[in-house]
Image (spheres, grey):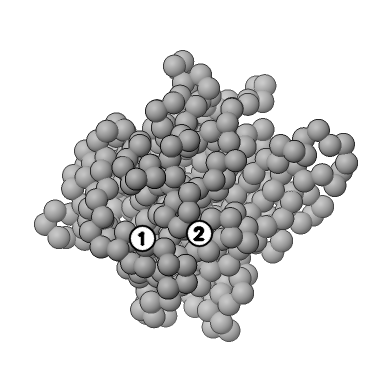
């Protein structure tokens, strides 16, 4: 659930089978894959978001890569072929857990001219020399994502392959994010992706180590929207956790300026083929336990939190405190996003994944 400015109203291209947040009181239309793995350019905001952990060179690493698409309304009436009707952004980060260091980079370009593109038929996004592409896996409906990103002082060359079916969040892929019907997104996740390939740190190429499958797991979110956040929301806390027993746990809360919760939600899938349990908006709570203050921006983040939901009571703890991303050169946001552990009420580690904290440095802009 990465940070990016967004605005109102949903539009729907004729014939597309997708969810319709503007008509939330009606039964949602079913998502259709592989089409809905692709871009939805009539809608304002979209992202493809892969986070994960891997073991390389004998140590644990966290990584994330996110591609954003944003419709540019001021250019819609312009006839020039050079008008920037769609912008593409990308963030990539690599966390060295042992060295307690975060590396990150970002890209931005307007769509077209061979520089940036996002296919409408399937996941195939290019931004300069960065790319995320999906291909069908050996099992019908499964996916194999290839990730290539050459950043300033690191690189990702990874493959993330389905081990479970797609997880549709909310009501069959229609995810409420606020008290108004239009505060809604289409939201599909793919947890427990198996990782292979390599990372590069400086001049060193480090292959993903085999033999430790639970250490080499990723999480994919694809979300598209036109009016995701209520005007009173300043940001959110979100987790996507691959559970060690094969399950998948999602939880989020959108906050007001005073820190109080405006809306919350999430889901639990207890196993690959288990039903998805969607959480009601008033059943999820995040309570800060420990904060970290960024020396770069002075922002104070709750890097350890207690999270209560219908699945139980858990503690989320950052594996490295300094996982802040300053993306003012692309999306304009400063936020925290990092590899974290999930422990249960008895203190046992039950999963790992990513915690995202937005709206702490500044209000997340909606226009």
Numbered badge on residue 301? 1
Which quadrant of the structure image shows residue 337?
A: bottom left
Query: Which residue shows up at 63% across the image and 26% down it?
Result: 11
Q: Position of residue 38 (x, y in %)?
A: 61, 41
Query: Which residue shows up at 31% across the image and 42% down it?
Result: 260
Which residue lies under the disc numbered 2?
A: 334
Closer to the camera in the image, 9 or 114: 9
Between the residue at mark 1 and the residue at mark 2, the CA separation in whole angstroms equals: 11 Å
Q: Is residue 236 above or below residue 176?
A: below
In this view, the residue farthest toward the left is: 346
Query: Which residue shows up at 26% across the image and 55% down it?
Result: 288
Q: Earlier in the sequence, mark 1 or mark 2?
A: 1
Which quadrant of the structure image shows residue 169?
A: top left
In this view, the residue farthest toward the front is: 258
Q: Is residue 205 left or right of residue 318?
A: right
Closer to the camera in the image, 265 or 6: 6
Closer to the camera in the image, 304 or 256: 256
Instruction: Label 2, secondary structure: give it.
Output: strand
Image quadrant holding the C terminus, namely top right
Numbered badge on residue 320? none
Q: How crowded is the residue under tag 2: few (<14 C-alpha within 10 Å), some, or many (20+)?
A: many
In this view, the residue farthest toward the bottom is: 203
Q: Is residue 245 left or right of residue 55?
A: left
């Amino acid at each position: 659930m990465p940070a990016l400015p967004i605005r109102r109203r949903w539009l729907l291209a004729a014939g597309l089978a997708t969810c319709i947040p503007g008509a939330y009181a009606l039964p949602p239309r079913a998502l259709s894959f592989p089409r809905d793995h692709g871009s939805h350019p009539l809608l304002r905001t979209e992202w493809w978001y892969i986070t994960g952990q891997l073991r390389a060179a004998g140590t644990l690493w966290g990584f994330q890569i996110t591609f954003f698409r944003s419709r540019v309304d001021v250019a819609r009436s312009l006839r020039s072929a050079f008008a920037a009707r769609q912008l593409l952004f990308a963030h990539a980060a690599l966390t060295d857990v042992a060295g307690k260091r975060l590396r990150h980079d970002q890209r931005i370009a307007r769509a077209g001219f061979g520089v940036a593109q996002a296919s409408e038929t399937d996941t195939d996004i290019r931004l300069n020399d960065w790319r995320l592409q999906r291909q069908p896996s050996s099992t019908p409906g499964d996916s194999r994502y290839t990730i290539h990103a050459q950043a300033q002082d690191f690189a990702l060359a990874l493959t993330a392959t389905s081990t479970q079916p797609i997880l549709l969040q909310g009501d069959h892929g229609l995810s409420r994010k606020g008290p108004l019907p239009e505060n809604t997104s289409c939201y599909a996740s793919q947890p427990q992706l198996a990782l292979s390939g390599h990372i590069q740190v400086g001049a060193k190429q480090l292959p993903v180590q085999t033999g430790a499958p639970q250490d080499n797991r990723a999480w994919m979110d694809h979300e598209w929207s036109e009016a995701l956040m209520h005007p009173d929301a300043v940001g959110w806390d979100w987790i996507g956790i691959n559970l060690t027993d094969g399950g998948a746990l999602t939880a989020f809360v959108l906050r007001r300026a005073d820190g109080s919760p405006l809306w919350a939600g999430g889901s639990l899938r207890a196993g690959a083929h288990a039903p998805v349990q969607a959480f009601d908006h008033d059943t999820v709570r995040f309570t800060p336990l420990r904060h970290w203050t960024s020396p770069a921006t002075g922002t104070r983040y709750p890097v350890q939190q207690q999270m209560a939901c219908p699945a139980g009571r858990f503690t989320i703890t950052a594996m490295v405190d300094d996982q802040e991303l300053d993306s003012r050169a692309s999306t304009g946001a400063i936020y925290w996003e990092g590899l974290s552990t999930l422990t249960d009420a008895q203190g046992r580690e039950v999963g790992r994944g990513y915690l995202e904290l937005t709206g702490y440095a500044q209000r997340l802009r909606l226009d």
